[in-house]
Amino acid sequence: MNNNIFIDSSILIEYRKGSKTGLWDAILSDTDVVPCLNQTVVSEYLYYHLAIFGGKAPLSIKEAGKIEVTLLIKNPLTFLELLEWLPDSPDILPLTINFMKKYNLLPNDALILSTCKKYGIEALATHDADFARPCQAEGIYLLSSAEDFAQFRTSRPSP
C-alpha cells in the first residue's frame, strides 16, 4: 500500500478555471498523500493552461508567437511542482494497448490507467467519467469529489 494518488489533468484544469476545486483542495490539505502525475497529464494540462490564461485556442497563441507571454501570466511550473513526477517506462506500452482494447479508452486515458497499475497507485483523482468502469475493474479507487477522497482516506489504515 502506498499513499500516492494519481491526479488526472481534469482535476488541475478545473481547479485553474476556478471550478470543481474541492477535491484538489482536499488532496493538497492532506499531508499523508502524495499527488502524482505523468508526462501525459503534464502535456494535457499545459495545453489547457495556454487556453485558460491566454484566452484563446492554444494553436492561435502559438501562431501569434505568444506562448512565452502566456506562460508569464501564470507560471505553470510552480503549480505542477506540487506533484510527484512518475517516469514513463517501456513496460507501460503493452498495458496501454491492452487497456485501450479492453475498456475502449483513448490513448492518453489508457496511459494514465497503465501508469497507475505500473506504480501500484490505489486511487485516481479525475473528473473524467471514462475512468469509471476501468477503475472499478482494475481495483483502483475513483475519486471525483472531496467526499470520495474523504471516504477513501477513512477506508484505509493510517500510514
Image: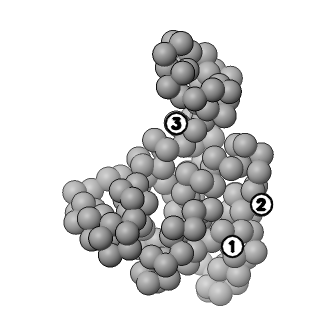
Quarter residue 25 falls in: bottom right
| CA neighbours of label 3 inside 10 A, class few (<14), some (14 to 19), many (20+) | some
Residue 4 visible, this angle: no
Would you name the residue on which mark 2 appears?
Answer: 22
**Which mark is on residue 47?**
3
Q: In the depicted view, which residue is nearer to us: 117 or 159?
A: 117
- Residue located 41% across and 47% down the image: 39
Q: Image check: 84 left or right of 74?
A: left
Q: Amino acid at mark 3?
A: Tyr
- Residue located 51% across and 70% down the image: 131
Q: Amino acid at mark 2?
A: Gly
- Is there a contact, CB below 8 Å, between mark 1 and mark 3? no
> From what the image shows, is residue 157 above or below residue 50?
below
Q: Amino acid at mark 1?
A: Phe
The earlier-in-sequence mark between 2 and 3 is 2
Q: Position of residue 38 (x, y in %)?
A: 43, 52
Q: Position of residue 137 (x, y in %)?
A: 44, 84
Would you name the residue on which mark 1 appears?
Answer: 149
> From what the image shows, is residue 115 above or below residue 49?
below
The earlier-in-sequence mark between 1 and 3 is 3
Kindly report the distance in space between the C-alpha atoms of the residues bearing marks 1 and 2.
10 Å
Q: Nearer the viewer, mark 1 or mark 3?
A: 3
Q: In the depicted view, which residue is nearer to us: 89 or 106?
A: 106
Q: Nearer the viewer, mark 2 or mark 3?
A: 3
